[in-house]
Amino acid sequence: MLNDMESAIAFIEKQDTEVISRIKNAWSSAFEEASKILLSPEKLRIEYNPAIWRISRHPVGIRMVSSIWGRYFIFEFASPNLVLSFDCFPSEEAKTGVMLHEIAHLIDDRRWGFDLLKLIADSSDYVTREQRAELLSFASYPLGIFEANRALIVSTLKKLGYSQDVPGDYLGPLAAVETLGRIGLNRRDDLIRFYGEVETHFPVHKVLEEYLSTNVFSLAGLVTAPDLNTCNDFGIKKSGDLALARAWLCKYLREEIDIRELEEKLDKISYSVKHDSYNPVSSMDFVHLDLKLAEENRKEALRAFADYSHWKSFADLQNAIEEIDAWLKFISNEG
Ligand SMILES: [Zn+2]
């Protein structure tokens, strides 16, 4: 059911209130489903609010509200609306993946003692808070996170006016590459070459430029704890640098600079997506995870990704799951 404000907003956005109400219910079910895998420290209220996309390009978001009855959290979804006339995360899997990501934020923020000001400072300067939430939710339900990233690419294509099957076989690998960047685990794939190859079939730089989320994470470094934010050893961590890296990659794809110039520029901002003696998973807290359900989900994802493992990015995703499995086995033996 929509409240009066949501109904009014739906009217202004020229949306069918029945449709928005159905989507709101689907987000509620996704939260219930996600809470079974990753125990949420807070209940979430769900609301429709297209302004979060109009103002800050967030297709979904979470907001803390303080009232005389105490503090509570609202999960907001922005689509469909007047500009994006479709649900950006249409499948149940993608919605559950998004909800797991939001729960993971609540857990991670508590772990590192983030109050509101610390949280705003950290997340506006660095991408690692975002990566830690994505990695914890990926460990919970890899296919949900993969689907959420795929949905963002498909929605960007829709907004650009392309039919979703334009990139053909490249949609899956693009989602895999973006998922790897968002979870901040090791990548063996040569991403510059990969994007160059996609560009010969389809103007992928347009997707990178118009991406329906604040950042494109494919060139981001490895996930770390907040105290390593300023360390250059683990690749790009600053949001400003990540935006630069994306802009340069697009210039290369548009043939405005050559590969040597691109690589030099990326080197200067410590571009790296691999580190042999550092395990990114070690910065995570898995105590809220239902280990059994999560393990089943990871097994299911390993099977699904195996069908595409001729793509290096999918082989990297399989590797990511194996790294998480090995770490969880290691800490359960320790404890
Ligand atoms: Zn987030």
Image (cartoon, grey):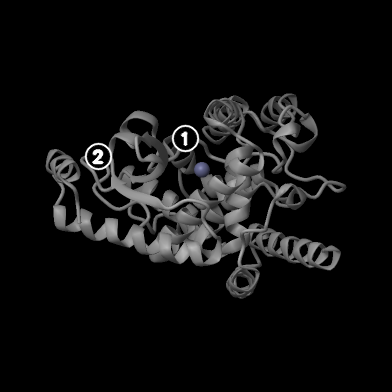
Crowding near the residue tagged with mark 2, few <14, some 14–19, many ≥20 C-alpha atoms within 10 Å: few
Residue to which mark 2 is pinned: 83
The three-letter amino acid code for the residue at tag 2 is Val
Is any part of residue 244 visible from this angle? no
Q: Which sits earlier in the primary sequence, circle 1 or circle 2?
A: 2
Which residue is rendered at x = 64% and y = 36% of the image? 113
The amino acid type found where label 1 is placed reads Thr
Q: Is residue 274 left or right of residue 265?
A: right
Q: Secondary structure at mark 2?
A: loop
Residue 5 higher or lower than 147, as above or below:
above
What residue appears at the point 44 percent right and 66 percent down from the top-left corner?
33
- Report the disc number at residue 214: 1
Query: Dividing the image into 4 quarters, which one contains the C terminus?
Result: bottom right
Q: Position of residue 286 (x, y in %)?
A: 67, 57
- In the depicted view, which residue is nearer to us: 82 or 123? 123
Q: Residue at x 62, y 62 (%)?
A: 289
Q: Quadrant of the N terminus?
A: bottom left
Q: Quadrant of residue 317?
A: bottom right
**Mark 1 neighbour density, 10 Å: few (under 14) some (14–19) many (20 or more):** some
Q: Secondary structure at mark 1?
A: loop
Residue 118 appears in the figure: yes
